[in-house]
Image (cartoon, rainbow, N blue to C red):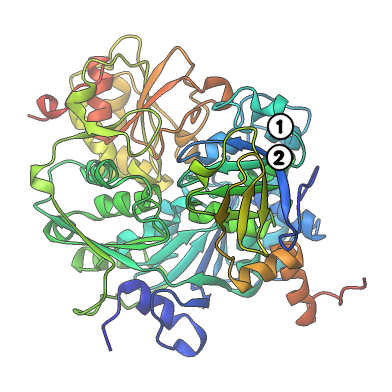
Amino acid sequence: MTGQTIAEKVLGAHGAGGARVSAGDLIDARVDGLMAINYQWMRATYERMGFPDGPPNVWDPARVFLMNEHVQPPADVDSAIGNYQSRLVADRLGLTHFYESEMGVCHQMMLDYGLVRPGEFVLGNDSHTTAHGGINALSTGIGADEAAYVFAFGELYFNVPETIKVVLHGAARPYPFGKDVILYLAGVYGDDFAQDKAVEFHGGFAADSDIATRLCIADHAVEVGATFGIFLADEKTRAYVDERNAERIPWRPVAPDPDARYTRVIEVDCDALGFQVARPFRFDNVAPAAASAGVRINQARIGSCANGRFEDIEIAARMLRGRRVAPGVRCYVSPASTRVYKQCADAGLLSVLLEAGVQVQDPGCMICQTPGIVLNEETCITSTTRNYRGRFGGSRTSEAQIYLAGPATVTAAAIAGEIVDPAEFLR
Amino acid sequence: MTGVTAMTDVDRPITGRVWKFGDSVDTNQLAGGGLTGATRDDTLRINCLRGLRPEFTEGVRPGDILVAGHNFGCGSSRQSAVEALALCGICAVVAESVARIHRRNSIALALPTFVAPGIAEFADDGDEIEVDHGAGVVRNHRTGGELALPRLPDSVLAIYRAGGLTAVIRARLAAAGIIPAETS
């Protein structure tokens, strides 16, 4: 009997009777937690189902985490109504973890409040729920109807995926470099190379990297099609999780067997990589930053579940200290959560950013969509999650040029007014 | 589904006119906002695929079929991406591959969505094709060609036949005594 991958182990432990499973099996998997965000999206599901007042039951009031974080504060009446209705639902069903009006990105709030731990199987109705693989949890995104199913029953049908082993060789950098690594992978192997598969990230770079870097790469696993993107747990993971695990819920990390079966092994020498940029409008339209050098920008954005953590904002402040955002450039920075926001404030980063001409925005998911419209005549470089056509303005702005890069590259562009290799600002 | 429904029984052949798109059509193209409609559904309909093909919204007719390349529906978990297609009248999607969440959302909302390797070469804009899941084939009425159509798993077919995932939820809640049994 061959060994098992992380996905096989976790899904097996969450299937019927904890029986051993293998890639290709279709199972009903019990979840450890459901992140349910933005009730207004789920409201449509419940209305269609004939429950205008919301879900008639909850599988476990302590393990459904209801958050209204995508629209904080609500800018329109429908959003406000959604938030209001969510409060009624949370009260009626006695939900233990309800965040009615806190600003932040759901995935970072899950971490900040210790709602997800290594070895767990967690689902959420946002595609970047893969992020928690950065702390060795098996987690992924689902739609609203499926979230309603999990809300009611605590389980969902799942294919046990094959696993790709990505071995990241090299040493961690003294600045955020996770975006560059995942962009490089997408550029070489395509934006669906891991479609319907799990990806395990191994190697010296993975072990050497901080949790923020791992979270960034796992977050973006969905951008290469992966169902799960997961790192091993180590002492850094333990320290990060235990600091936030307020309820002291026990957890056990999961590692693959030495003879686990992988469908593919990819090796990357991260030491040999430079800064990467994805050009419009695909995640895999990637080239070294120098290939886009000289492209004038109107807007620069730093934030999101991918790159809105303290380390991402710290590098922006480090580069901007004593410098200014170029004239004509709108530079937005949004911390990923209230906790991260406070961390930045305590470290004095916010005043550096403000003095440099940055617009510091509220924590939350808005940095990754709108407001902050980019017009058809304009160009933006962003460290958020996607550079899709019309990402920052919809179908009326489908020609707006959006480049995707890590926070160092975005900050360098904000200073220079054009895309540059950030290496010169880091010396 | 709210608004106009284009749900079609997966057990019967679906015949329609093709709109063809390339690889990695993302959810921002399907449901990314932009123009403001009179209602939520109207907003979804008038912006669907407009950024890629401005003529789509005006030209699409109920019963049309969308053909796409690899990684169709990549991106967000937004279920409105499926709703938008249905609101435009699209009654089936056939793609080289469909991104995982979008494929699951299509099943949940019972919009017939199939993966058929070779479809991008097999059908062109304006062709009339017949998607015959029961027979496991796609027929191109213009060229006379046939393309193998892999069968959906039985568990997925069961969700389609129930009319979508919310119907499955209702039935299970009723079976558990949480809501009254359906009277039909």
The quarter of the picture where residue A22 lies is: bottom left
Q: Mark 2 lies on which chain?
A: B
Q: Which chain carries label 1?
A: B
Q: Name the residue under label 2.
A: B64
**Type of amino acid under label 1:** Val
Residue at x 75%, y 67% (from the top left corner): B162
Can residue B44 be seen in the rendering of this structure?
yes
Q: Residue B171 carries which label?
A: none
Residue A132: x and y in percent read 37, 60
Q: Mark 1 points at which residue?
A: B60
Image position of A286 (left or right of A48): left
Q: In this view, does A110 lie above or below B59?
A: below
| Name of the residue lying farthest toward the front | B144
Residue A6: x and y in percent read 32, 73
Asked whether A108 or A244 is in front, the reply is A108
Residue at x 52%, y 30% (from the top left corner): A370
Q: Is residue B126 above or below residue A243?
A: above
Asked whether A348 or A244 is in front, the reply is A244
Can residue A60 be seen in the rendering of this structure?
no
Q: What element does badge 1 sit on?
A: loop
**Type of amino acid under label 2:** Asp
* Same-subunit check for callouts 1 and 2: yes
Q: How crowded is mark 2: few (under 14 residues within 10 Å), some or many (20 or more)?
A: many
Q: What element does badge 2 sit on?
A: loop
Asked whether A247 or B139 is in front, the reply is B139
Quadrant (top left/top right/bottom left/bottom right) for the C terminus of chain A: top left
Quadrant (top left/top right/bottom left/bottom right) for the N terminus of chain A: bottom left
Image position of A63 (left or right of A236): right
Q: How crowded is mark 1: few (under 14 residues within 10 Å), some or many (20 or more)?
A: some
Tell me whether circle 1 and circle 2 mark residues in contact (CB < 8 Å). Answer: yes
